[in-house]
Amino acid sequence: MLNRLKGFLYDCIGTIACFGKRPSPSPKLLIIKTDEIGDFMLWHKFLDELIGAERFRNHEIHFCGNSSWESLFNCFHRGKVARTYWLQKNVFKRQMPYRYHFLRTIFREHYSCVINLQFSRDKTFDDALVLAAKAACVIGMDSNLENVRSYQLGYDRKLYTELFTYPERPIFDFVRNRLFTEFITKKPSLIKNTRIDPAALPLLPFTLQKPYFVVFPGSRNPARIWPASSFITVANHLHTTFGWTAVVCGGPGDTTFSEAFLQGYEHPYVDLTAKTSLPELMSVLKDAACLLSVDTGSVHLAAATGCTVFGIFNGSQYGRFAPYPKEIADNFYAVYPDEVAKEVNDPKQVQERYEYVVDIPYRNVSPEQLIQQIKNHYHQ
């Protein structure tokens, strides 16, 4: 009932924000992507092909993104679009004046075309922006139902004028994004992987002594936590085997997890928790021997730099974000609990059980499983 009331309030705010006149339409495109860091990293290289498409040749192009990865967008794409909007998702959800003014701004621009880049569309966020734009041309994906409640089914029936549909599942998100780009541009994409030009990354304001490996022990999602003791066991193996120094990374919200790791880790380390921007974190990862992390945006940042990834996963959305296809990254190792690793060999099980988020504990992955992957990779 509470969620329905919130939804009704959001609908009212959206309706009020779209009252009144607005300027005459002109060729103007709004591109919307408000999901998370990993989603951005699996898409952003397609931006150039979108904005260079013949159908948008005479359009002024604007972009609306998630404020959490604004620094990444500016690092790789500054100056490529005429205007950017950075959505603070928590504020947009909780503070109605902010929500109203954001939607009102989108409505007043009178876009001729809108592209929503998200597969798991959400009435609360991206589709609310699409609705406020009220464009004549609206392009999107035939969404899955991950973010749609039962009482919301069908809300978007007349929202889109062009829908991209791809029935195969699971499909790796980068591949879906490439197919969606080709659907829009009507041309084959030249983008084959997520690797970035290291020259685009910032120089670090400090020096890290090589060789080192990166430990990312935290997560914003409390369900995606691997025990500090497990991280310590694997980090001990890397140090005693190779002599590498641990570099501990994370955002401001990860300090508790970093502290738990460092309290039990007795070898040399450098603590960079909350001390780097996202582009600086990528600069750290670029020169690292490998990354140890749970299923967070850090694994996608690392993969884009060519850093070897040893990631802990629980089977959620299997095939969409991990494992990476070998042709996109051949040094990305997604490690799953034994029971998950057995079940995902059956495509029917993947489709029926692992398409969305599952509640299998990440702690079910043992440190010995990760160590075995490390031994296999380094031919120990």
Image: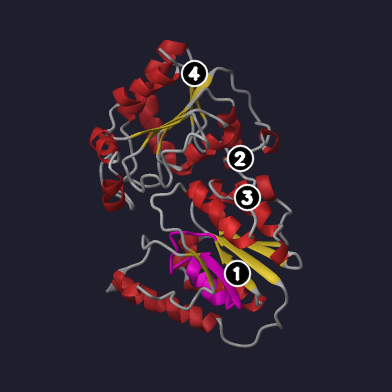
Amino acid bearing label 3: Ser
Quadrant of the rendered image containing residue 335? top left
Q: Which residues are magenta?
A: 117-140
Residue count near mark 1 (Cα–Cα under 10 Å), binned few <14, some 14–19, many ≥20: many
Residue under numbered circle 1: 114
Between discs 1 and 4, the one toward the N terminus:
1
User: What amino acid does circle 4 point to?
Assistant: Thr
Local crowd at mark 4 within 10 Å, few (<14), some, or many (≥20)?
many
Could you say which is closer to the camera, residue 138 or residue 217?
Answer: 138
Q: Is residue 62 above or below residue 216?
A: below
At x 44% / y 43%, what residue is drawn? 253
Q: In terms of depth relative to the viewer, which is nearer, 76 or 315?
A: 315
Mark 3 or mark 4, which has the lower sequence index? 3
Residue 55 visible at all? yes
Compare residues 375 and 204 and report the one nearer the observer.
Answer: 375
Crowding at dot 2, Cα within 10 Å, few <14 / some 14-19 / many 20+, comes out as: many
Please name whichever residue, 338 or 175, is drawn nearer the observer in this view of the structure.
175
